[in-house]
Image: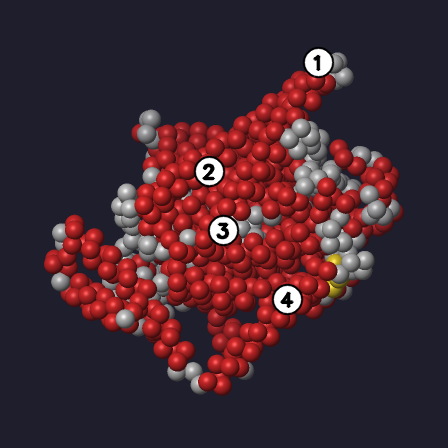
Amino acid sequence: MAALRRLANFITTLLRELGDEAAYQRRLRRDGRAHSAEEWRRFIDERLKAKYSRAKCC
Amino acid sequence: MRAICGWGGFILAVIRSLKPDKLNSAQGAAHAQALLRRIGAALCEPVVRDSIKSEPAMKKILGHAAWALASVGAAFCLATVALTRGEPVNSIWLVLAAAGAYLIGFRFYAKFIAVKAMALNNHRATPAERLRDGRDFEPTNKWILFGHHFAAIAGPGPLVGPTLAAQFGYLPGALWIIIGAVLGGAVQDFVILFCSMRRDGKSLGKMAREEIGKAGGLAALLAVMMIMVILLAVVALVVVNALKNSPWGTFTIAATMPIAVFMGLYLRYLRPGRVLEVSAIGFLLVLLSILGGRYVAQSAAIAPWFTYGPLALALAIIVYGFLASALPVWLLLAPRDYLSTFVKLGVVLMLGVGVVFVRPELQLPPFTRFVDGSGPIFAGKIFPFCFITIACGAISGFHALISSGTTPKLIAREWHVWPIGYGSMLLESFVAIMALIAACALQPGVFFAVNSPAGVVGAAPEAAARTVSSWGFPVTVGQMERLAREVGEQTLFARTGGAPSLALGMAQIFSALGGERILAFWYHFAIMFEALFILTIIDAGTRVGRFMLQDLAGHIYKPLGRVSWMPGVIGASALIVLAWGYFLYQGVRDPLGGINSLWPLFGIANQLLAAIALCVATTILVKMHRAKYMWITCAPLAWLLVVTFAGGWEKIFSPDPRIGFLAQAGQLSAAIAAGRIPAARIAETRTLIFNAQLDAAVCAAFVAMVALIFVDSVRVWIGVLRGTREARVEEAPFVMSQLRVEEI
């Protein structure tokens, strides 16, 4: 049961990382800010700009 | 002695971190750097040895016995796959052989490289720790980063390449995927990731410029840009061939666009930050669109709206590519990319589970008659074309761009490059094995009927079935029609490009788990899955190409370099789209199906990029005074140079018009001169001649660029080894890691 819980935790953490949610939380923590629509938009614009300036693999 | 040296270096490093001004002179810094490099080698080995010493003797013996058993088991499975003749082999042998080879490669070869050649050192702070900014640089859990890196390197390549190469039979492709990945592809990813990590996450182009020279850096940049153009054209062609005359497939893919826009708006305005939530909603909507596609295809009124020939689809994708690259990323590209990444991981997992549970038999023989080079899918013999066709899955130069991109900036400990760099590539190779199994599990007649272009087997179903059967792979028109009906398509003849046959194979495996009545759903699910991330590659690739072009154009006229200046954005987007759009158009008009000329060109380009990466890696090893281990990167480099130069030579100069671009142009010119081409088709034939000459020129340019980098690299190696050239590496200085375990 504990192993299953660990697996579920791992999958959720991975998905949150792939979905940039974890990076957003880190950013909020680092800057000591609270979540808001404006904060998210600022974060995601910056992140996507960096993300899509690199080629995607084949 | 080594331990003393290690601890001495360790103390020096501590002193240096405390009093950096004492080592500030250039000579002092160089001397210190040389010493500090030795620390790495010295420190990590005692760590490894100590951990081994502390193991109980019995545990150690059992460990050795288990590995010996695994090696014998893997060898036995591989022998079964390789030596069985005259009867279908169960795919589980191939799965076990591959898994065994990967485990042994990972445990022994990769660890050997890590200890001896790289001297990985967990005491050395990584850029993620030293430059931590919570944005680009952030120490990340190794398994999370493994998933992240794998999601970034896995694309359609490992799915499509093995499917196409199955025309030689299952064995050549399977052996190349396993051996190529263990000794070549994974080594390249691993070493480049290590090199980039030691250089604060520098890109491949930058490392080439700094370690080899300016010519190397420029050639790497140009190679990346040209490869991207060919890549975008060839993957777009795969989508066109999968969707032509398929209202169900076209509807599903068309539906992903409004779904992605909805997701983008939801994420930006309705529930900002809820990526997983909106992706789940998007996934449900995509599933509904797959289910709805059946009714669209069956409706006499709506089906014609979504039924298009290859040319119309190609034009639609070209226009789409232009719009998508100019639209804000949050609106279409990013939400679809999230969806595509999640679906990709899910499907890869499902395919793995499906293959293990269903254990389909490999219907294709180990070798087909097409090893002689007369293959209908693409022309050319096993050597060199099998090794060019399967790039991703065995060795892919594009991975070097990812390994020198985001990943090195997120590595928490140096030893994490072992599972992330080497292990991720092994997993991708495993995906390629799964794709090969899915394709080879189809009946050979069906496989060739689906993948052979009309220009080879004939446009009429009867002619196609007759030709395929005459090769010794019986298939009937009735059988193909029944299969097409079962998957909700009008026809499955001449659906070249690899995607439809792979979708058929996957659908058969999935439906064996979930009921054969939903074969059509699984087929269109697989097509949607392939098209979804191919379109994401097209969007992102066009955008990246636009940035590169704007960057170059900015040197001529400054405003052109501004990514927010609309005329510059539109002009650069249009140029990039026209570049790959032209090759796509050329592929669509090619009587041999386009894949015959474009996929080998893409394969050559991708392998040549791998050669550039291995040149950089070898140069760095030589400069690190690890010349005695340079064979680790030189062996795959030598193989790639032989394969790609031979492939390039054949594609340009082969006298066979199905292989050689110049022979093809010559044959068409002779036909015009002899008056064998009707007047109405002369203009079109002239275009084909130009296309063949253009392909020859592009191929020659790739080969010339790599030859330039290789010669430049050899010059550096000889200089360093003879002592006539300074072995100055551009590594970041050693800093002691302060990272606590709980932080990662």
User: If you read the primary sequence from the N terminus, does the residue marked by circle 4 or circle 1 appear first?
Assistant: 4
Above or below, B96 against B387 in this view is below
Labelled disc at residue B635: 3
Q: Is residue B293 visible?
A: no
Q: State which quarter of the image contains the N terminus of chain B.
A: bottom left
Q: Name the spot of residue B415 as percent of width and height, x first.
A: 39, 66
Question: Residue B508, percent across and down?
Answer: 74, 58
Q: Secondary structure at mark 2?
A: helix
Same chain under badges 2 and 4? The reply is: yes
Q: In percent of the image, x 47 and y 63: which residue is there?
A: B110
Circles 2 and 4, Cβ within 8 Å, touching? The answer is: no
Mark nearer the N terminus (4 vs 3): 4
Q: Amino acid at mark 4?
A: Ala
Query: What amino acid does circle 3 point to?
Result: Ala
Q: Residues within 10 Å of mark 1 (few under 14, many from 20)?
A: few
Q: Nearer the viewer, residue B588 or B39?
A: B39
- Answer whether labels 4 and 3 touch (C-beta < 8 Å): no
Q: Which residue is mark 1?
A: B673
First in residue order: circle 1 vs circle 3? 3
The reply to whether the C-beta atoms of the residues labelled 2 and 1 are less than 8 Å apart is no
**Do circles 2 and 1 both sit on a common chain?**
yes
Q: Identify the mark nearer the N-term, 2 or 1.
A: 1
Q: Is residue B240 left or right of residue B368?
A: left
For the residue labelled by badge 3, is the local secondary structure a helix, a strand or a loop?
A: helix
At 48% from the left and 73% from the top, the residue drawn is A9
Q: Disc 1 sits on a residue from what chain?
A: B
Which residue is the extreme one toward the front?
Answer: B722
In the image, which is nearer the foreground, mark 2 or mark 1?
2
Q: Which mark is residue B75?
A: 4
